[in-house]
Amino acid sequence: MNTPFPVAIGCDEAGFELKELLKRHIEGLGYPVTDFGTHSMAPVLYPDIALAVATAINAGQQRLGVLVCGTGIGMAISANKVLGIRAAQAHDTYSAERARKSNDAQILSIGARVIGAELAKSIVSAFLASEFEAARSGAKVERINAIERDGHQ
């Protein structure tokens, strides 16, 4: 296992139960977790949760994050609107691992209505255990950063 580092977690009401399970799982792996909500099944605007997690990562308060909604799509789209953030939706361990190794993703987004709890735990474990392979993918990620910084024109 990597040296434990801070992990942010957040969800909307559709992801609440899975988020609670994943929070315990991540803590059980030895990582400190900060929960950005939601803290109940009451409806929330998931972009606000994604923004809070992404902002904490950009500020250096958290190293990586996990977002859970119904499909994982809306959370990933929302988090990716934050300058400097790379959020990846993954519903298998290979994609979660590659999100870190190839794309230096800081946020994993998963869908509670798409996968079960045991698979979700495996996906999160794979994401947290993986490190960016800068020698192989650094130029590609830098190009992504340049597009974000300079636009695509």
Image (cartoon, helix red, strand yellow):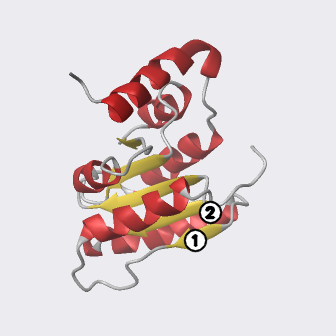
Q: Residue at x 48, y 39 (%)?
A: 105
Residue 14's spot in the image, x, y percent? Answer: 26, 70
Q: Label 1 is placed on what type of residue?
A: Thr
According to the picture, the residue beneath numbered tag 1 turns out to be: 34
For the residue pair 127 and 75, the one nearer the viewer reads as 75
- Considering every residue shown, the one lying at the far right of the view is 3
Q: Earlier in the sequence, mark 2 or mark 1?
A: 1
- Residue 61 disc label: 2
- Residue 93 disc label: none
Q: Is residue 70 left or right of residue 34?
A: left
Residue 148's spot in the image, x, y percent? Answer: 34, 34
Mark 1 nearby-residue class (10 Å; few <14, some 14–19, many ≥20)? some
Q: Residue at x 58, y 13 (%)?
A: 136
Q: Quadrant of the N terminus?
A: top right
Q: Label 2: state its secondary structure.
A: loop
Q: Label 2 is placed on what type of residue?
A: Gln
